[in-house]
Image (cartoon, rainbow, N blue to C red):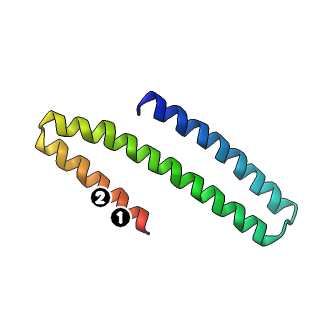
Amino acid sequence: MQKDAKAACVKRLNRIEGQVRGLARMVEEDRYCIDIVTQLGAVSAALRKVEEQVLRDHVAHCVEHAIASGDKREQRQKVAELMEVLERAKR
């Protein structure tokens, strides 16, 4: 993973970690269900952003490297990996 993408992901994940701890407190304190669901949505959206960033980095670095290498097997493997992860994301 590229250094700048890695730093951005770690920063986001640390923020998400704090959100999750806040959610646990909300549940422990019997907060209003809709407030909890709203915060769960925010955490899910934040995780999707990290996922997008990691995928962008993967395409910009790993897939680009496979294309530049000229290695057809490696190229097919990287495309197959992307297709798999996109299929999982649909579920």
Splitting the image into 4 quarters, where does residue 91 fall?
Answer: bottom left
Numbered tag placed on residue 87 in the rendering: 1
Numbered tag placed on residue 5 in the rendering: none
Which residue sits at x=59%, y=52%?
Answer: 46
Q: Secondary structure at mark 1?
A: helix
Q: Are marks 2 and 1 in contact (CB under 8 Å)?
A: yes
Task: Inspect the image, locate mark 1, and give the three-letter code of the amino acid beneath it.
Answer: Glu
Q: Is residue 60 left or right of residue 41?
A: left
Distance from the alpha carbon under mark 2 to that under mark 1:
6 Å
Q: Is residue 17 above or below residue 39?
A: above
Which residue sits at x=76%, y=71%?
Answer: 34
Q: Residue 33 at x, y = what percent?
A: 78, 71
Q: Is residue 6 above or below residue 35?
A: above
User: Of residues 42 and 14, which is closer to you in this image?
Assistant: 42
Numbered tag placed on residue 83 in the rendering: 2
Q: Is residue 18 above or below residue 29?
A: above
Q: Quadrant for the N terminus, please.
A: top left
Q: Residue 30 at x, y = what percent?
A: 86, 66
